[in-house]
Amino acid sequence: MSQSDPAFIFFTLILAVGSLLGLVLKAKVPPFFALILVALSTGLLLGLSPTEVIASIQNGMGGVLGFIAVVVGLGAILGAILERSGGIQSIADRLAAGSQRSVPWKMSLLGTLVAIPVFFDVALVILIPLVLRLARALRRASLYVAGPLLAGLAAAHAFIPPTPGPIAVAALLDADLGLVIVAGLIAAIPAVALGGPLFAQMRYAEEIIVDAPDHAPTADTTASVGLSAAIVALALPIVLVASGTILKLTLGEAHVPGAISFISHPFVALLISLTLYYVYANRALGLAASDLNTASMKALEPAGAVVLVTGAGGAFKQVLIDSEAGARIAEMAAAMNISVLIFAFLIAALVRVVQGSATVAMITAAGFTAPLLQVADISDFDRALTVIAIAGGATVLSHVNDSGFWLVNRYLNLSVSDTLKSWTVISTLVGTTGFLVALLLSLVF
């Protein structure tokens, strides 16, 4: 059996995925280390010389990190300053006010907004006191309030840049980030609605906690100082990037002014928003530059891990391309007549279920899907939809091997069974709905 034989390539790729999962799950090897080791071994098995495989890893890392490091880094700092200045709490308290019937919808919106600049686990830790306070005030089960919030957090974390997941996959698939934002927003709306308020009202609306206090929650007036500025800081980079993409689609790229193209680039859009809010937090709110710097440096610690894992995924992808294994994958997928979106979703979902990490699932699925896109005749919008399909697959079926599962379990004081019946169902509804929306869009456009 030769190294160019499809059966050998298929066996090698199965071995690569199995080794990756074994290293991460059994040996507890960090995903970055595991991905680089598997990329190197796979390249050698597929016929690349030692020099070629090292060059392939280097080129794959460099090609991805040049974009992803800047965007994730700026996004992490923006989220940290929003949290440190009280901007996140301002939005939370404002959305918490109002009628009881609107609370699940407002909590979904809150989760979606907050998870755009802030990591999922950080956002949950910040907002959980508000969730518990609201649940007591409404005399409802905590999941009546927390479920919609979790759906919003999960959907934004999966589908809407500048969260790291979709940015990483977009970079690996060479997808236009503006189109990913547009597709992600379209996919997120029904995903949040179904996994959030609709599920919560169907499942938890009748659960009344009779011994809870009946007074309404009071807003934190000191935290509401930066509300408008916080909303602008959240919305501005998304609006700038998406507007540039929309203008290119409607006018044609050649007719879009250079200044618009410049400010709508993700680097510049995030930098503008971050600069404006940094100055506002320092001058108008009186936060010391040293405090902002400390918060920013702390936020870059988890961001650094995401960047490195994404870069390792880029190295693995490049090995598959340079060894021409990717072309063989594409041929096999074409022979099976399977949609690229369905292939991407299934790979991401499989890795997600087996090893738990949404990030690893996204990066692995992107590495396998990228070679298909090199030979497939699909539009730029379909390429963006493929990002959403991967993100959807990497979101479904969060269970006991996912750190997010235990975070929800611990902070909401749930049993394992109740966490499976709530958070696992919510994550599956969000991921599957987002994928189905992407699939529908690919058939319509």
Image (cartoon, helix red, strand yellow):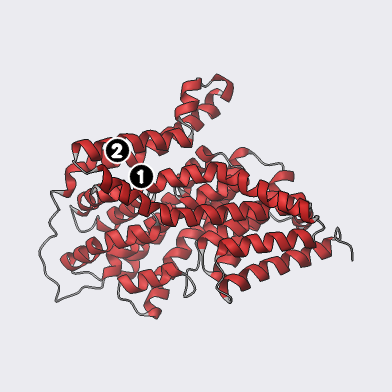
* Mark 2 → mark 1, Cα distance in angstroms: 8 Å
Location of residue 435 in the rendering, given as x and y in whole percent from the top left corner: 54, 55
| Amino acid at dot 1 | Leu
Q: Secondary structure at mark 2?
A: helix
Instruction: Name which of mark 2 and mark 1 comes first in the sequence.
Output: 1
**Which percent across, then down, holds residue 236?**
36, 36
Categorize mark 1 by other alpha carbons within 10 Å: few (<14), some (14-19), many (20+).
many
The residue that disc 2 covers is: 277
Look at the numbered disc 1 and give the secondary structure of its residue. Answer: helix
Q: On the picture, is 48 further left or further right than 127? A: right
Position of the C terminus, as image quadrant, is top right
| Most foreground residue, 312 or 367 | 312
Which residue is rendered at x = 14% and y = 59% of the image?
217
Q: Is residue 1 left or right of residue 262?
A: right
The amino acid pointed to by label 2 is Tyr
Write down the quadrant of residue 133 in the picture. bottom left
**Do labels 2 and 1 touch, CB within 8 Å?**
yes
Say which of 298 and 172 sits in front.
298
Residue 266, compared with residue 53, is above or below; it is: above
Q: Is residue 351 above or below residue 366?
A: below
Of residues 73 and 90, the one drawn nearer to the viewer in this rendering: 73
Q: Residue at x 44, y 46 (%)?
A: 73
Residue 78 is marked as: 1
Question: Residue at the spot x=29%, y=38% of the render?
Answer: 277
